[in-house]
Image (cartoon, rainbow, N blue to C red):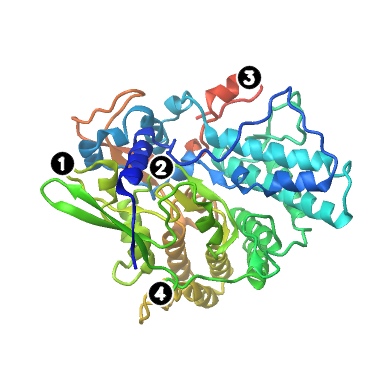
Amino acid sequence: MMKRMNKRSIVTCLLLGSILGFVSCTDKFLDELPSKSSSLPLTNTAQLDAILANYRDFWAEANKANIYASDDVALLTGLYKSAPGFYSGAAIVGLQAAVWDYNNLINAQSDDFWSKEFSKIFRANMVLNAIDKVSGMEDEKARLKAEAHFIRAYSYWVLANTYCLPYTEANKGEMGLPLKTSTSFEEPVGRATLEDTYKFIEADLQEALKSKQALVQNGAAQHWRANTAGINGFAARYYLNLNNYQVAMKYADAALAEYNTLVDYNTGVNFGFTFNINVPGQGPIPLQFPSMFTTSPVDYTTRIAWKENMYIRVLDGNFSFPSSDLLAAYDTANDLRYKYNVVEHLSYMVGAVNPAFDYPGYVFYYITALPSGITTGEMYLVKAECQARLGDFNGGIATLNILRAKRMKPGPWVNLAAVDKADAIKKILLERRREIPFTQRWFDLRRYNNNDDPNDDVTVTKSFFKFTATAISGNEPPINYTLEKNSRKYALPINNVDIVTSNGIIKQNTY
């Protein structure tokens, strides 16, 4: 039986989210870093455990690259004509990221993603700096140490894949990230090389892999804590993005050997919520949302309960309007991800009703919250891709079909077949785009354009109006914006506030 949502409250929240762009009306999960004067005496492992146990400090990601910059994201001139507020005002920051206008993006008011990921690194360093000085059982110390290394590795990896160029032999000497290992505010914060940054991440990852903490504890999965399935899953992601398919597959297999739960969309997902939007000249139009969706931006229980999470993180930012290319990737008649996650008429939620502009949106946990952590679905995709790229293309397709059986209506369209390696890779990458849109696409574009396979290279082109830092030329014809495969704009700029705060020690990317 469908639940009817409180229309007034959710529309208010959604409209605020559209006006503010990437600053959604969802709860601001993360606290600011402690000040220089703050102090917290740490004397035992229970205190360190409490630092790492607060999932709201760690799971939110407001990454403008994933939210705006990839070719999964639509820029809709019709939406601007109908609801200018969605793109105007503070939301122009989203446009700047979407068309890689980094000269202006540099001067945006702030960058939550950079600061919040370093906040997570700070917390991990608190634990690592104190672990040998506090009281507690040695096995508990080992667990917390591995978890802190995992958190730091994860945050540095997403930062490197957002603000640095892709890791290649030619790019090793390019700028990486400030490598923080202490909680000292006086520690130098200059950017290490990209090679040293990746060595740092990999060293943390190897320490994290020493964890003995299983995902399922006493019959219940602890999706929000570092665990062996999630850490192996992150290792699979890490090595896949380095195009090291043999090692990536090893870790994907290890993750799936521990935890391979998939939600069957035929039985495990339904329409859980519906409500009507009144469209002038058309009357009430029903919008239907999947059962994993919640009307409350701060209802965390649904997110934690999603059974496919090996380690939960959430991309949290703006409405996700899929590009025409992404929509065309779905079998709209038989793919249940299209049925449930692609919500028809979502443009009406941001006021695009007069004149009416009808366009679907992609949703999962909430209007602005998509799963970006390690999942079983991703692990099947990693394994399938690695099998195919290593030559076992029939094995890769067989692995892929395990996932498809849980996502498609039953029928002959479920089981794909491939005629050769190239055909298998093409089908697997298209399935990957359908399964994890937005959250991994920017990272995928970076690696596709820097591996040995020219068949998966992508040049991204978007069409939208000309605009400045303060205004959109909506009465002029749209123009094309293009991101070439080898563009230095695959590294987002560091916000100028952070450059200035560092007294110029942190250097800006060059374009």
Element carrying mark 1: loop
Instruction: Name the foreground residue: 246 vs 402.
Output: 402
Seen in the picture, residue 258 relative to 190 is either above or below; the reply is below
Q: Quadrant of residue 131?
A: top right
Mark 2–mark 1 distance (CA, rounded to whole Å): 22 Å
At which x and y percent is residue 83?
A: 24, 37
* Residue at x-position 62% and y-position 43%: 57
Q: Disc 3 versus disc 1: distance between alpha carbons? A: 48 Å
- Which residue has dot 1 on it? 355
Q: Which residue is mark 4?
A: 266
Residue 277's spot in the image, x, y percent? 23, 50
> Do tag 3 and tag 1 residues touch (Cβ < 8 Å)?
no
Looking at the image, which residue sits at the far left? 281
Identify the mark at residue 504; answer none if there is no mark. 3
Label located before the other in sequence (4 or 2):
4
- Would you call the spot at circle 2 few (<14 residues within 10 Å), some (14-19), or many (20 or more)? many
Task: Please state which of the two labelled residues, at mark 3 or mark 1, is closer to the viewer.
Answer: 1
- Counting residues from the start of the chain, the first of labels 3 and 1 encountered is 1
Measure the alpha-carbon separation of dots 4 and 1. Answer: 37 Å
- Name the kind of residue labelled 1 in the image: Pro
Local packing at callout 3 (Cα closer than 10 Å; few below 14, some 14-19, many 20+) is few
Pointer 2 residue: 318
Q: Give the crowd class for mark 1: few <14, some 14-19, many >=20 residues within 10 Å.
A: some
Q: Nearer the viewer, residue 326 or 274?
A: 274
Task: Please tell me in which quadrant of the rendered image residue 409 appears.
Answer: bottom left
**Which dot, 4 or 3, sits closer to the camera?**
4
